[in-house]
């Protein structure tokens, strides 16, 4: 989900030197090709998770009792559909970022939480973890539709695809490359499961996760926000004609960062 928005922006910069009409046609073609390609990939992943749900649960938690195991299998089925819709939502968000539209995708978590809260409050005392999982699935479907509508509004892709349209392969390759990096950065759940649970005792994983959440508040608000907002503009300078401006921007950012660090 993090890789998709990151990959779309630099791939589209390769068409920046084209004429406006040609760039629009290539953009529309890549939008539809990417949508069909990722919908197919996500569908295969979701189907695989659904079919292998028992095996996945056994690999993750072989010690579960029968009742818990049955519940876990049902939750993984919900997860399978969740993956599909959240993946498409990430694809639509990426196109909005590419067009430098940040408000509508930033509001989608608000929409998700409102839907979850409404479902939770309507169920009242009947709420259990399975009902909460369905609430997240419903909100994910709504978020996918919401971001899809805004992506169509800002991209305005044409259904006509002419000759010489861009290949979707560079987008796929870059997405999987970024996904591999994201997986490396998310290795801490494996450490929690394999080490923290064994040596620290019951309840410590939740405590560690909350500590990580608190520690990431400042980077999440400042660093991640800055990176997300600046990335499309920096990518604009990635074409060969803008190499000098990209170097100047990099040197200027280093100087400003050094000055800010000294002041701090």
Image (cartoon, helix red, strand yellow):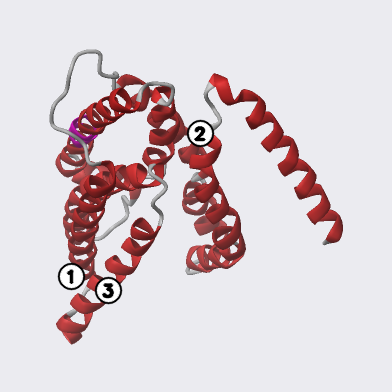
Q: Which residue carries the number 1 mark?
A: 131
Spatial distance from mark 1 to mark 3, Cα to Cα? 15 Å
Q: Position of residue 245 (x, y in %)?
A: 64, 30
| For discs 3 and 2, the disc positioned in front in the rendered view | 2
Please check the rendered image and state whether residue 6 is part of the magenta-colored stretch, yes or no: no
Spatial distance from mark 3 to mark 2, Cα to Cα? 35 Å
Q: Which residue carries the number 2 mark?
A: 236
| For discs 2 and 1, the disc positioned in front in the rendered view | 2
Position of residue 247 in the picture relative to residue 51 (left or right) = right
Q: Which residue carries the number 3 mark?
A: 114
Query: Which secondary structure lies at badge 1?
Result: helix
Q: Position of residue 52 (x, y in %)?
A: 19, 40
Task: Find the residue positioned furthest to the top.
Answer: 164
230 to 211, vertically: above or below:
above
Image quarter where the N terminus lies is top left
Q: Residue at the spot x=46%, y=52% of the render?
A: 193
State which region is magenta.
35-40
Q: Residues within 10 Å of mark 1 (few under 14, many from 20)?
A: some
Q: First in sequence: mark 1 or mark 3?
A: 3
Asked whether residue 174 is in view, the answer is no
Q: First in sequence: mark 2 or mark 1?
A: 1
Please check the rendered image and state whether residue 36 is part of the magenta-colored stretch, yes or no: yes
Position of residue 247 in the picture relative to residue 59 (left or right) = right
Task: Find the residue positioned furthest to the bottom.
Answer: 125
Query: Which secondary structure lies at badge 3?
Result: helix
Q: Position of residue 218 (x, y in %)?
A: 61, 64
Q: Position of residue 150 (x, y in %)?
A: 25, 52
Q: Residue at the spot x=51%, y=33% of the render?
A: 236
């Amino acid at each position: 989900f993090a890789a998709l928005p990151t990959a779309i922006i630099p791939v589209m910069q390769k068409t920046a030197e084209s004429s406006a009409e040609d760039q629009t046609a290539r953009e529309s073609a890549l939008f539809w090709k990417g949508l069909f390609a990722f919908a197919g990939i996500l569908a295969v992943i979701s189907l695989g998770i659904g079919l292998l749900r028992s095996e996945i649960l056994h690999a993750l938690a072989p010690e579960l009792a029968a009742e818990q195991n049955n519940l876990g299998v049902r939750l993984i089925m919900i997860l399978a559909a969740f993956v599909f819709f959240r993946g498409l939502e990430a694809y639509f968000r990426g196109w909005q970022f590419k067009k430098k539209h940040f408000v509508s995708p930033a509001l989608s978590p608000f929409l998700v939480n409102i839907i979850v809260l409404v479902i939770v409050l309507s169920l009242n005392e009947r709420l259990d973890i399975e009902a909460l999982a369905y609430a997240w699935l419903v909100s994910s479907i709504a978020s996918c539709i919401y971001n899809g509508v805004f992506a169509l509004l800002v991209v305005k892709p044409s259904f006509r695809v002419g000759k010489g349209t861009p290949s979707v392969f560079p987008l796929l390759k870059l997405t999987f490359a970024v996904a591999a990096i994201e997986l490396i950065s998310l290795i801490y759940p494996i450490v929690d499961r394999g080490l923290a649970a064994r040596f620290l005792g019951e309840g410590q994983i939740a405590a560690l996760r909350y500590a990580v959440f608190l520690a990431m508040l400042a980077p999440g608000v400042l660093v991640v926000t800055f990176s997300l907002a600046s990335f499309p503009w920096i990518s604009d300078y990635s074409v060969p004609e803008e190499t000098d401006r990209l170097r100047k921007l990099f040197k200027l950012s280093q100087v400003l960062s050094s000055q800010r660090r000294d002041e701090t």
